Each structure stands twice: as C-alpha cells, then as structure tokens.
Amino acid sequence: MSQFAVELNRLCDAKWPGGDRNANGQMAEWVSQQIHREVDRQYIWRIRKGRVYKVDADVRDALCTFFGVPADHFSLAARRTVGQEVEAAIAQTGLQVAGLRADELSAGGRSDLARLLREIGQVLESEKNGTES
Amino acid sequence: MSSPLLHLTTKRDMYRLASAITPDGEWSFAEFERRLGRALGGVEVRYMELTEFTVGDLTGLAVWSADRSTAIIGVPAVASSDHKIHIAGHEAWHLLARHEGCGRCTAAEVDAETFALRLGSQIARRKSRRDRQSLDLATAFGVVGLGA
C-alpha cells in the first residue's frame, strides 16, 4: 500500500474513530467542490486501498483542507515514515551505512535503502547459519 | 580496528589506493575484495549484487557490519559489468575514507566518483600493459602476423 494511502487511512481513523459508512462520500463531495470537477466516492475508496498510483496534486490539496492539515502533510508524513523504515532496517540488521551512490534520495529511494539493508542482512544471516539465501 | 588509512586527503592517496586495489590480472571481484580488505587494514570485504534497487536514485551502497569486521559493497544486479566495477570503486572510496551515514556530502561524492574513475584508469592501464607483454612474447616467438 502507498504511503499516501496509509496516511489517508490514519487521518480517517482519527476523524471517524468508529468508522463512518459515508466517509468516502463526504471526502469526495468536498474534493469535487474544491477542484471544480467530479470526484466520486469510488475514487476515494481506490485511493484508500492504495490502488491509485499517483494522486493528483489538486485532489491531495483538497484532502488536506478537508482534514485541516497543512498542504505538505502527506509529503512530510511519507518522509517521516520512510525515515523510520530506514532506521528500523538499521536497527534490525545492525548494519552501518558508510556511503551511498545516489542523488538526493526520494521516498522511494529511502524505501529501497531499507530493503537493501534487509537484503544484505538476510544474506549475512543465512551465511552465518550455513544456509543459502 | 585501526587502519593506517584514516586520513586520506591527497590525490596521491587516491592513485596509490586505486593501484593497490586493482587486480594485476583480469578483473576479478574476489581479488578486489581481498585487496580492498587489505587496504582497509585487514577487514573482510564482501561484494554483493543486490536486487532491491528499484527506484533508480540509489545505485550503490557501502555498509559496515555491526562489529565493523566486515565491509559490504552492494551494487545493482542488473547493472552492466563495467558499471558494477565503477560503482564498486565509488563505494570503496566511502569505506577507505571512513565516511559515515546516509547524509549527502557533495565533496565526499565528488571524491568517490574521482576515485572510481582512477580505478577505471588503473584497470585500463594494466590491461594495456598485459596486451603489450602478450604482443612482445608473440613477437619474440614469431607468431605475430601468421594468422592475418
């Protein structure tokens, strides 16, 4: 599931702790009004399920205003999450990064880094246990 | 573990180290690992071709094991042979210069790329020398030109 979907679901859980059958409808109506084009609740449902690969900027901004959070909320949340993902991978594997060959790391790049650390950790662990990875 | 190479600052260091970690014969990552480990002061070096490079903005990494007894260089499994060597050279510099952390430092990256190019030059120079020696031998035994 995308970082965007995870964060949107977290905001929904905070706004409707017991859930709300019309939550997607309310968001769709608000977004439609804000961006002056029709967005239906099915589209919101697909975003929440992580089935929308890239959420349009105007939809994202409208969702931010719906929840009363800053416009950069989702990007900041994604950065926090992938930062934690890398830190978790470092803690899990015990590996210490000496250097990276990379341009400025995107959220995807940092996710790659976390997965690579785990991949190295698994190779080292399986060798230590005398098994092939 | 202490290393005599903790303070690398000069171009001469780069040339010397690029030469030290370049295999004499055909390029071999096993020999590269052995030579780099020696240059790092006797640690084990592991070269790994990894699959989890998916986004494209990360093309190599160097890490230390928790006890710093092993240094690991990871390159994308899908890279070309020459690119793998270049990336390995870049990451080798991060290890040799004892860089730390995920943070970006432009000077460190420029140095690492420069070192990777030095390594490429060393490899080319040694190959040229081997070719010349082969030619000399062939000439000495009168083989040159027979197949033309």
Image (cartoon, coloured by chain):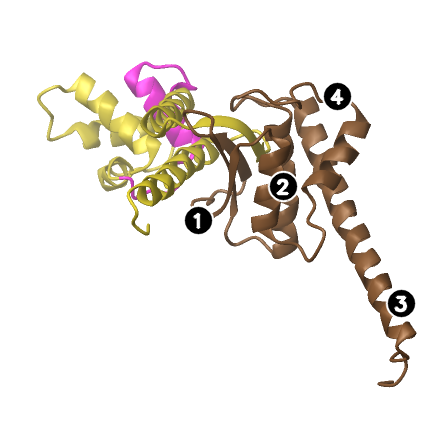
Chain colours: A yellow, B brown
For the residue labelled by badge 2, is the local secondary structure a helix, a strand or a loop?
helix
The vertical placement of B119 against B147, above or below, is above
Residue located beneath label 2 in the image:
B35
> Three-letter amino acid code at disc 3?
Asp
For label 1, the SS is loop
User: Which of the two residues, B81 or B53, is positioned nearer the viewer here?
Assistant: B81
Q: Quadrant of residue B105?
A: top right
Q: Amino acid at mark 2?
A: Arg
Nearer the observer: mark 1 or 2; the answer is: 2
User: Of callouts 3 and 4, which one flags the residue occurring earlier in the amino acid sequence?
Assistant: 4
Q: Position of residue B148 (x, y in %)?
A: 87, 85
Q: Position of residue A106 (x, y in %)?
A: 49, 31
Judging from the image, mark 3 belongs to the subunit labelled B
The residue pinned by badge 4 equals: B9
Label pair 1/2, CB-CB below 8 angstroms: no
- For residue B51, the mark is 1
Q: Nearer the viewer, mark 1 or mark 4?
A: 4
